[in-house]
Amino acid sequence: MFTYLMLTVKNLHTYFYSEGNCTKAVRGVNFDLAKGETLGIVGESGSGKSVTALSILKLIDQPPGKIEKGEIIFKTEEKTTELIKVPESEMHRYRGKHIAMIFQEPMTSLNPVMSCGDQVIEAILIHQDISKAEAKNRVLALFKEVLLPDPVSIYDKYPHEISGGQKQRVMIAMALSCNPDVLIADEPTTALDVTVQKSIIELLLKLKEDRSLSMIFISHDLGVIAQIADKIAVMYKGEIIEYGSCKSVLQNPQESYTIGLLACRPPLDYKTRRLATVENYLYSDKLPFKEEKIKVEETEGRLERLAAQKPILKVDGLKSYYPKKRNFFGKTTEYFKAVENVSFEIFPGETLGLVGESGCGKSTLGRTLIKLMKPIDGSIEYDGIDVLNCPKSQLKALRKKMQIIFQDPYSSLNPRMTIGQAIVEPMQVHKLLSSDAQRRDKAISLLEKVALKPEHFSRYPHQFSGGQRQRICIARALAVEPQFIICDESVSALDVSVQAAVINLLKDLQLEFDLTYLFISHDLAVVQYISDRILVMHKGKIVDRGTSEQIFKSSQNKYTRKLISAIPVVSF
Amino acid sequence: MLRYIFKRLLTGIAVIITIVMLITTIIFLAPVDPAQLTFGQRAETGAVAAKRTALGLDKPLYIQLYYYLRDISPINIISLADAQKRRYAFTSIIPLGKKKLILKKPYLRESYQTGRSVSAILSEAIPKTILLALFAITLASILGIFLGVIAAVYKNSWTDNIAVVCSVIGYSLPSYVTAIILALIFGYYLGDLTGLNVQGSILELDDFGDPVYVFKNLLLPGIALGIRPVAIITLLTRSSMLDVLNMDFMRTGKAKGLQKTKLIFKHGLRNALNPVATAITGWFAALLAGAFFVENVFNFKGLGEVTVTALINFDIPVVMGAVIFTAITFVIINVLVDILYAYLDPRTVLY
């Protein structure tokens, strides 16, 4: 089927040097890519998959990066080139023209001050000697090919004026503009909603057929890779540990790491007590993971028990708007209705899942609940207290009971505070415990609770990985002994395996401290796993609600069905 | 956009009225009698009192304020009887019975010292200062942005280090010190070689008493004024460029095959310019407001010199005129900056 090899990477080593330290990001990677073939590279963050991709086009910043050794042989019908030996001043002839690339973040990968059309035209005019008018026609044709709605108007729009999915389509159009032989897609769908992700993958599959493109598709999500790749390379700590056809790797994985990766996604059709993590498979000293299914009767019993209580949080007719247009005197004349007439209740000890795509208002709802934002209308009642109209002194007590854990563990910790200070501070604010020594002891016990070590107390956030930081945020939220925690996309930025571990932790803590969660996420699989009941939010409104089972197995709602069908599943 | 400009101009007028109120109050409270000052030491009491009445200084503060605002407002309602006494030309628009609505140039009164009209004094000084400020800021912008970009692209190299160290030195040097150094070296010691004058303004009288433009007289004061802005612009461009160079879209540009120079200037610089634009326009407004020290060193006879001389002599109308001009400059330049932002970055929303 595949005629000849386009790209061969042999023994590639890329290292990063900083302050005398050498990080060996890529250590001896070998793979090849035939014409019309798609190679999927899968691995967790820091596994070296992006660095491998960037090394092919020599897009690594040098310094600090350096391609230490290896060969990258690029073959077209006319000639064979060793890309590593091509001097930097000549590299631009290959970039974009023969090998094109699309990136993870469509939001930041386009130049914000240039119109979309101009950015694609630029790519064409670099490599081809044609008139601007001709190039414009070609751009419009490309926009049509990548299924952008209304190509003529998008042509003149700036990146901030179009949606994330549309931006990624512009990126794809730009990458394809010079008919490249190889397309490298570095996590092209990770930052997008599941439904958009699905449509982008369909587009890439179609383009691959139409143009017989060779493609390198990088993702941390095996489900996505499974849908698009002909063969798979699994990367771990800078090396390819498993390499083979898509089918053989998924059906019959040899390495324990691959097995772990496949196992740690939450299952969709039944519930388990705990999720597997990669560690369960990697280290032989740990007990082998045994999946423990939860019986349907147990789930039903729990739901009944929860619903029999008095609700801890009651939200009625809540409306949160953002100003959209203002008149001459600065008065708002038009609103963006982020949360429109939302009512629900949460029972003590329950996990309520709130799921929806980006921009549906789910985060605004979370912020409004703890009064980080003032709603236009509606009422919020927490444990009998009217949250919106209570006096300041009561509000402070409420804040102690209600905590929030944000999405991005990198920006939600103050980089100049040790994590110990970060955890102790809320206790000081709420005057918990009588002395700082006691607070310190409590912080250390909390660190242990979230599987960190006491010696981490005086370290700074940058010394931790993403998963560890999210654990710190959880410890900080727990410091004031809250009853109710809002998890706003708290596991979305984490690798699947780390995500599984954090979800396990959240479940353990719920049992131990009797916590109630509002779990906000765009990831239906995760929400389904952790939640007792689920609300589906779309354009500011709750469009579907029910128990996790009902939503997943028998929902009649069209939107819910669309979300569920877009979940990437590893199928054999 | 138009709505925005209109709104900003309204706030601008409020700013000017506030400034007039502030200065009038300060002068009213100051223990100096401007009427006395116009006569000098040996004035007769009667004459001084007459002068006070003529200048309206015997009136209470709010009346003085009202008179002044009425004088500077371009639109006014005056009574017909009053009209003859006015010392300025006006065009009537609508007659309103015994009164009429008139349109006039803002009347800034006359200097206490020389009796010349303040408008005339200012219109003589301002063009010189505008030319000087424009020259200095253009020089500073071109040099500063270029140095900043180079420093950012070759970060931590010797070029970068030199640029940064020079910037810090340049910024630390007071402009009058640079002015004196420049005047001494290039005007005095090397004067024959460079052909530059130690002192002189852009508009000088030639041997026959006719005014001539001497553009080379811009050079030294322009450089002296420009050195601090160059330093600031270099440092700002550098740090702003360093941020931009690490952004994802720069990598996209490289991946599509753009060559380095084009990538840096077309994609990088345009995104890095916002803070730099703030600095440039801010400095330009400050330079327009008068650069007394440098103007003094070079005897440039610009706005700064006029203002300071007037202040020393308590020549209130001139001070007021200069301050109002400065305020208007700042208001207009701020509006222009905001429009410039919107042009540089399409994400900007003007309210």
Image (cartoon, coloured by chain):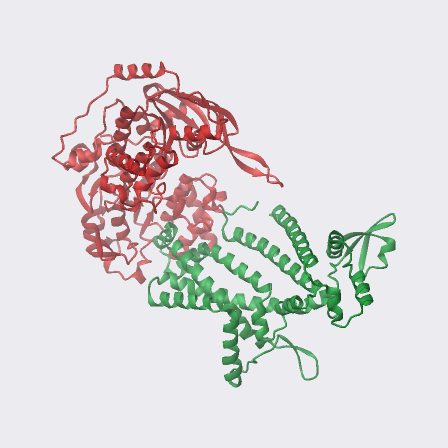
Percent x, y for residue B27? 68, 59
Outermost residue, left direction? Answer: A285
Q: Is residue A247 visible?
A: no
Percent x, y for residue A418? 31, 44
Closest to the observer: A377 or A371?
Answer: A371
Percent x, y for residue B343? 53, 52
Shown colour of chain A: red
To which quarter of the image does residue A304 belong?
top left
* Tally of numbered tags: 0
Task: Identify the residue at horizontal 38%, vertical 61% (top origin).
Answer: B152
The C terminus of chain B lies in which quarter of the figure? top right
Does B112 sit left or right of A419 as displayed? Answer: right
To which quarter of the image does residue A130 belong?
bottom left
Does B31 sit left or right of A56 as displayed? Answer: right
Does B140 sit left or right of A557 as displayed? Answer: right
Percent x, y for residue B233? 47, 62
Task: Identify the residue at horizontal 50%, vertical 49% (top origin).
Answer: B346
To which quarter of the image does residue A427 belong?
top left
Q: Is residue B293 visible?
A: yes
Does B59 sit left or right of B231 as displayed? Answer: right
Shown colour of chain B: green
The image shows residue A560, relative to residue B134, as above or below, that is above
Outermost residue, bottom direction? Answer: B192
Closest to the observer: A210 or A481?
Answer: A481
